[in-house]
Image: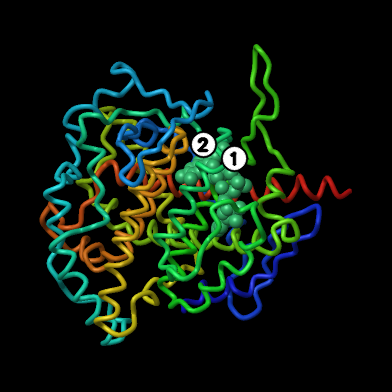
Amino acid sequence: MSTVLCCFSYVKYHGFRNAVCVTGTLDDCACDVETIDSFNNKEIFPKLQKLLSSDYFRFYKVNLNNPCPFWTDHSQCGLKYCAVKPCTEGEVPEGLKSSSYKYSEAASQDIEECEKAEKLGAVDGSLSDETRQALQEWKKHDDESDRFCMLDDEDSPKSQYVDLLLNPERFTGYKGPEAWRIWNSIYEENCFKPYSVKRPLNPLASNSGQGFYRWLEGLCVEKRAFFRLVSGLHASINTHLSARYLLDENWFEMKWGHNVSEFQQRFDEELTEGEGPKRLRNLYFLYLIELRALAKILPYFERPAFHLYTGQRTQDNENKKLLLELLHVAKSFPLHFDETALFAGNKKEAMKLKEDFKMTFKNISRIMDCVECFKCRLWGKLQTQGLGTALKILFSERQIEAMPNMSNTNPSFQLSRQEIVSLFNAFGRISTSVRELENFRSLLSNLKQ
Ligand SMILES: Cc1cc2nc3c(=O)[nH]c(=O)nc-3n(C[C@H](O)[C@H](O)[C@H](O)COP(=O)(O)OP(=O)(O)OC[C@H]3O[C@@H](n4cnc5c(N)ncnc54)[C@H](O)[C@@H]3O)c2cc1C
């Protein structure tokens, strides 16, 4: 188990009735929640927000019209807050529309390139022989198909550009059995849960949610990690909807802001019978995984041939500078998650696990097509793709590390614009959640006084 994964088991949460306070006294390792909070809120968050407001990152191409592949009794969310306004032709910068990557070699990031992953090579010398061998086996498999590539939306004629700044993730009113069915289906079918353990569809029906998570205790570290990522995403979405809640509405304006009691209902230790703090721990876990991926991907973006192409050269150069600054900050974080601890066991088992992991992840991204609320679907798809891209990066360490030494301009590791946009925006969501936890902490402490 990695240090960080382990250390979060020892985070002390002080969940008192009027507060959901995440403080980080970490008993047996060097990291603590305060370090992450301070690092994120001061160093990462402001830079990331600036970057995400640029044209390159604000336009996301997505197909919101895919039919749900899992069930047919499918209604559409009638709430007006669920609607997504796609961009008109004139609103999308010229450079993004056609040959999107004109002065970028990220141009070669089509499906073909994506599926042709890279040939094997040496692995990080710090790994054990066993791990090194296992990694080599996975790389061979990766050559055949990189399952984290999810480019279908990018190529679909039904896809449309959406301006993410105009469609912020916030409270939509999407809830009840339809929302539960999505979450349930993700946890029930896709988190390596034994079939003998049942998750209640209606979480209010009984307190049978208690004990549901016990099956996790019997799982290996990888499968627990997978569950934690999903749960972290769930926690992040629910933090956002509590932070940008519709507080009031009249004929001329809508007032959005923090809804403290909504937040407490979801995360207070007592109100959630101990589950809330675990969910917040999972959010931090997700943060660390995505942060680690950003630190690793630096060589890819540092190549002179890479541009954040929108057709506005000066702006594009400035954005690249900002992006590199951000990645250097991400790299400087002293307590990174050690992803080599994942899949480091028996070679055969490790290969199988990684495949299961990827398959399960892909399945979750398809479940997003069943989300009836379009705005929730938009952000659900983006964040799933962003997390998938982060995992793709973590599993491609060798190819990325080899990049600065490669003289050719067509590296075997590729990211599509779509993957890049989703990676940074997904991390932007988690980073904002961590920032919002501080806001809620201070609102709650004001309430106490
Ligand atoms: C993909 C997706 C995107 C969404 N996006 C939005 C959005 O943008 N805006 C919006 O207003 N609503 C959104 N929703 C709905 C929102 O997530 C909740 O489902 C809804 O607010 C109802 O909340 P709830 O309290 O009934 O519990 P839910 O959040 O629906 O959770 C169901 C049950 O799962 C368990 N649970 C809750 N959190 C966690 C966790 N972190 N880890 C593990 N288990 C957990 C609890 O037992 C809970 O009762 C989205 C839903 C989905 C599926």
**Residue placed under numbered mark 1 in the picture:** 241
Q: Secondary structure at mark 1?
A: helix
Q: Is residue 110 above or below residue 65?
A: below
Q: Is residue 156 above or below residue 2?
A: above
Circle 1 crowding by C-alpha within 10 Å: few under 14, some 14–19, many from 20: many
* Label 2 CB less than 8 angstroms from ligand 1: yes
Q: Quadrant of residue 425?
A: top left
Question: Is residue 61 among the parts visible in the rendering?
Answer: no
* Label 1 CB less than 8 angstroms from ligand 1: yes
Q: Amino acid at mark 2?
A: Glu
Q: Residue furthest right?
A: 449
Front one among 94 and 214 = 214
Q: Whole-percent x and y of residue 114?
A: 17, 52
Instruction: Give the CA separation, mark 1 to mark 2.
Output: 7 Å
Q: Residue at x 40, y 60 (%)?
A: 189
Q: Secondary structure at mark 2?
A: loop
Relative placement, left or right, of 129 versus 246 is left
Circle 2 crowding by C-alpha within 10 Å: few under 14, some 14–19, many from 20: some
**Residue placed under numbered mark 2 in the picture:** 169
Q: Whole-percent x and y of residue 383?
A: 41, 47
Identify the mark at residue 146; answer none if there is no mark. none
Q: Whole-percent x and y of residue 303?
A: 24, 52
Q: Amino acid at mark 1?
A: Leu
Q: Are marks 1 and 2 in contact (CB under 8 Å)?
A: yes
Q: Residue at x 42, y 49 (%)?
A: 325
Q: Is residue 168 above or below residue 364?
A: above
Q: Residue at x 57, y 74 (%)?
A: 7
Q: Quadrant of residue 416?
A: top left
